[in-house]
Amino acid sequence: METRINAFEKGQKALTTLFGIGSYLRKSTIDKQLLELVNFRVSQINGCAFCLDMHSKELRAAGETEQRLYGISAWRETPYYTDRERAAFAWAEAVTATHVADEVYQLAKSQFSDEELIDLTLAITTINTYNRFNIAFATVPGGYEVGMFG
């Protein structure tokens, strides 16, 4: 596999807006670990190898267990995610699929404040954008190092 365009190098002007969103989300009241788990789950759905490599490394460095990483694609059938994590995964899957059913909204509202739900939605739409850039331009996975992008 060969990178088509290095979007992080050639697209600095375009991606600056996404970097700003990342800075904003780092100040969110939503736990950083939960946002990373959501990034990992959305990247699984979208099949973004680069983002899966990056977020799995960040999660492991933050102390996430292998069991929870391996089980995240089957989170509904596993006992080791909190209600808040489950609500975030359901919301992430629905927003990524572009259809949010009322019951998914109610579940998310039971775990997140209005502001947090807006931040979570912003995080989900942002990782979807990164996934699409990496897939479109064939960003090669494997070289990411923890903390590489701040």
Image (cartoon, rainbow, N blue to C red):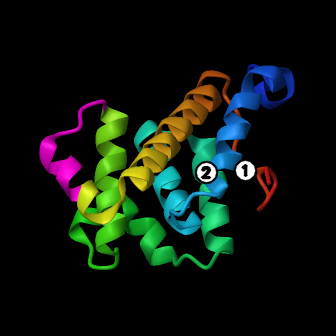
Q: Does the magenta stretch include residue 88?
A: no
Q: Which of 79 and 108 is in front in this view?
A: 108
Residue pictured at 45% horizontal, 50% vertical: 120
Q: Which amino acid does label 2 sit on?
A: Leu
Label 2 CA crowd tier, 10 Å (few <14, some 14–19, many 20+): some
Magenta range is 98-107
Q: What residue type is labelled 1?
A: Gly
Residues at discs 1 and 2 in contact (Cβ within 8 Å):
no
Relative to 59, residue 63 above or below = below
Callout count: 2
**54 with respect to 88 (left or right):** right
Please tell me which residue is depicted at 57% across the width and 57% down the height of the picture: 28
Question: Label 2 belongs to which residue?
Answer: 25
Q: Name the residue under label 1.
A: 142
Task: Please give the label number shown on residue 88.
Answer: none
**Within-10-Å neighbours for mark 1: few <14, some 14–19, many 20+:** few
Vertical side of 59 occupied by 140: above or below: above
Considering every residue shown, the one lying at the far front of the view is 114
For numbered disc 2, what is the local secondary structure?
helix
